Image (cartoon, grey):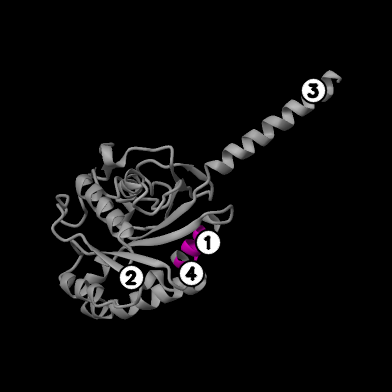
Amino acid sequence: MGITKLLSLSLFSMLIISHSSLAANLAKDIFILAGQSNMAGRGGVHGGRWDGNVPTECKPNPSILRLSAQLSWEAAHEPLHADIDVGKACGVGPGMAFANELLSRANSSSPRIGVVGLVPCAVGGTEISQWVRGSRLYGELIKRANVSVSEGGVIRAILWYQGESDTVRKVDAEAYKGNMERLIMDLRTDLSIPSLLIIQVGLASGEGKFVETVRKSQQEIKLGNVKLVDAKGLRLESDHLHLTTISEAHLGIKLALAYLSV
């Protein structure tokens, strides 16, 4: 056999191995992270800068990937939303702790977890009205969600932490339940997943005085396959609005336990 043919076969084998390795590492269990700043992550952000502290619960793991702003899978690491919630300082959010907790609990007695794919979509300071069907944020979420499953994998849940911006005006706070229910139904329709699990986070803080009104709205949502994980009581940064680094990690663990209990 000539050397040219041997080289060609060797190159072909390398390409097959490379492709197989890539396929093996594609995200299998996909989770959409959406909402505003506490989902995007402000843990450890002080004076407009992140302190770089990454707790053990949020460390990188070869089995955790993130979909970048360029719509490609890459190794996930904090801050997850750095290229999504642009123009703002992003720090630690709940996503990495969530994924690490899922993987640490994956065993024969719990749902099997493969490679976890996180799809960051959260943008700080956004009201729920900015997430309605037809809006830019809604369109980006749908696009990123569809790309995330284009090479295999399944969207398992949307993790939603938003509402702080809807606590400023009473009319927005009182309309939150209806707006959230409509958003859930639209997302399930446009993603063609009628029973898609939605795990929403009960507010721990707000920009206005109607926090309890929004919290009540969250608690009153009775659509099927919608769970509530309460963040109330978790420590806040000195701005009294954003969760601390450790609180974000604790929230991620709580979200993972909620998912595994379904």
Residue where numbered disc 3 is placed? 6
Q: Are marks 3 and 4 in contact (CB under 8 Å)?
A: no
For the C terminus, the image quarter is bottom left
Q: Label for residue 33?
A: none
Badge 1: few (under 14), some or many (20 or more) residues near its Cα, within 10 Å?
Answer: few
Q: Looking at numbered disc 2 in the image, what kind of residue is underneath it?
A: Val
**Whole-Å distance between the Cαs marked 1 and 4?**
15 Å
Viewer-closest of 115 and 90: 115
Foreground mark, 1 or 3, reads: 3
Sooner in the amino-acid sequence: mark 1 or mark 3 = 3
**Whole-Å distance between the Cαs marked 2 and 3?**
57 Å
Q: Looking at numbered disc 1 in the image, what kind of residue is underneath it?
A: Lys
Residue 96 percent coordinates (x, y): 34, 46
Element marked by disc 2: strand
Residue 11 drawn above or below residue 53 = above
Sooner in the amino-acid sequence: mark 2 or mark 1 = 1
Residue 218 percent coordinates (x, y): 25, 72
Badge 3: few (under 14), some or many (20 or more) residues near its Cα, within 10 Å?
Answer: few
Q: Looking at numbered disc 3 in the image, what kind of residue is underneath it?
A: Leu
Magenta segment: 138-145
Instruction: Name the residue at 21% across, 54% down.
Output: 242
Residue 157 percent coordinates (x, y): 40, 61
**Whole-Å distance between the Cαs marked 3 and 4?**
48 Å
Foreground mark, 2 or 1, reads: 2
Badge 2: few (under 14), some or many (20 or more) residues near its Cα, within 10 Å?
Answer: some
Sooner in the amino-acid sequence: mark 1 or mark 4 = 1
Sooner in the amino-acid sequence: mark 2 or mark 3 = 3
Instruction: Name the residue at 34% across, 51% down.
Output: 109
Q: Is residue 192 left or right of residue 35?
A: right
Q: Label for residue 226?
A: 2
Q: Label for residue 193?
A: 4
Sooner in the amino-acid sequence: mark 3 or mark 4 = 3
